Image (cartoon, helix red, strand yellow):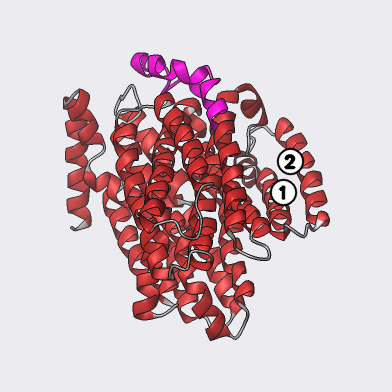
Amino acid sequence: MTASEATETRTHDEAGIASGSGTGRRRAAFSWRFVTPLFMSSSLNPVNSSLIATALVPIAHAMGVSVGRTAVLISALYLASAVAQPTAGKLAEQLGPRRVFLAGIVLVLVGGIVGGVGQDMTTLTVARVLIGIGTSAGYPAAMVIIRRRAIWAGLGEPPGGVLGGLTVAGTVTVAVGPPIGGVLVAAFGWRSAFLVNIPIAIVALLLTMMWIPKDEPLRRSAPREIVSRIDITGIALFGGTMSALLVFLLSLPDPDWIPLGIAVVLGVALVLWELRAPAPFIDIRLLVSNLALTRTYLRGALTMMAFYTVLYGVTQWMQAAHGLSAQVAGLVLLPMGILAAIVSWPISARNLVRGPLVIGAVSMVVASVVLALFTSGTPVAALVAVTSLFAIMLGTTSAGNQTALYIQAPAEQVGIAAGLARTFNHLGSIASATITGIVFRHHVTDSGLHLVAGILAGVGIVVLALTVFDRTLKTIKAQRRTGDGASRPGGR
């Protein structure tokens, strides 16, 4: 499709919005052309976070280092993403989401090239940082684009079908990373874990340029005003706080207390600065006053902690204690991603929140109790069954929390709110690595699996309490019906 044809298509879609109503207006506003590049780019971060898992051992052999040293490739992406996602959301709100979206895709392309030709661990780490920063732009910028499109089209409630696709692309796809990585590494070698980003980034770049409408022209501002609007000081303090905190978490079970002390000092400085900033990077007052949004962040973090514990911890147990091969263990997990996608889509399409969140929390508790009964002689069919329960947890909570965030976050801050949600998710994933690292520190055993199951059951009970006793979730449906939730600050 040429640029002129793309412009003509957008004009046609916009004309349809003006003349249509209800479902017709929604379909015109969010055509498949419009959402395809959004979904593609939003999937890059979760896929890359788990895609590397099957390439770590071959990378260690190729670079002549221990397998333990390759863990930096995982933590580098987590660290870069945790800082970059809310930053990308802030930049998308201030500089234009399409610009940030495109910049992120370019960074992914560069990271794929650097990693594909890298000859040492330092170069590969730089590549993972570039990929982490670049993929971090996809989800928060997409949320800004979708929110602005919905407001422009006059939609009174969240575009559920679009959010459903974004849930699958932005969260659920993490489960398919290891199986895809296993196929790529087996067929083309470990470099394919980096090189696969190149064709995807090129396609996403072209589709975005053709099918996503351009941002409004940037207004001319003095450098000091731009710095104030973006809050560079707040971003720097947040980045330093998160970096120090994640370094501390990654040091467990042998804690390095110095990074924790640095995180506390920078965290206090961040709060004091943001309370006085005219356009704060993180609106501390909003997090305190809008506790519903804060609880959504906590539910998301705890859910992803449970999911990643299953994704990596239970996988270790299946291989080391149960005796399954890496390929079979990956196949056992494959239905989890597929089922989670099937579950999440209709929930998002109907803008359901509280019911799915309750089901997800109950599924987590039940699955954890069943997991505590497993031994190294448990049939593979039972493993598939329990991971299916965790898939229901992932699909229901991802969809419910995303819709809740869309409604609870102020329209002008949805980008940074979406980025912060991803940051909380990354904290959950780091916490899961800490749990499995401590429990399986010396040996991977059935008793260790039972301890992990007990921890997950406790987390499930906490998530259930955060859902059942959250009265604001009961009012979301009524707010959507009147259209207040999509436009009122905080959706409260």
The range drawn in magenta is 463-492
Residue 286 lies in quadrant: top right
Is residue 235 toward the left or the right of residue 101 in the image?
right
- The reply to whether the C-beta atoms of the residues labelled 2 and 1 are less than 8 Å apart is yes
- Quarter of the N terminus within the rendering: bottom left
Query: Helix or strand or loop: what does disc 2 sit on?
Result: helix
Residue 91 vertical position relative to residue 66 in the rendered view, above or below? above
Q: Nearer the viewer, residue 291 or 172?
A: 172
Expressed as whole percent of the image width and height from the top left, the position of residue 245 reads 71, 51
Query: Picture coordinates of residue 155 (x, y %)?
Result: 31, 25
Query: What residue do we see at 29% from left, 45% from top?
Result: 35
Was residue 237 drawn as part of the magenta stretch in this picture?
Answer: no
Front residue of 268 and 472: 472
The residue carrying mark 2 is 270
What is the magenta segment's predominant secondary structure?
Answer: helix
Q: Is residue 474 part of the magenta span, yes or no?
A: yes
Q: CA distance from mark 2 to mark 1?
A: 8 Å
Counting other residues with Cα less than 10 Å from the Cα at mark 1, is it few (<14), some (14-19), or many (20 or more)? many
Disc 2 marks a residue whose amino acid type is: Leu
Asked whether residue 297 is in view, the answer is no
Figure check: 349 above or below 194: above
Instruction: Specify the label residue 241 is tagged with.
Output: 1
Residue drawn where x is 34% and y is 24% of the image:
157
Q: Residue at x 62, y 68 (%)?
A: 72
Q: Secondary structure at mark 1?
A: helix
| Residue 126 spot, x, y in % from top left | 58, 70
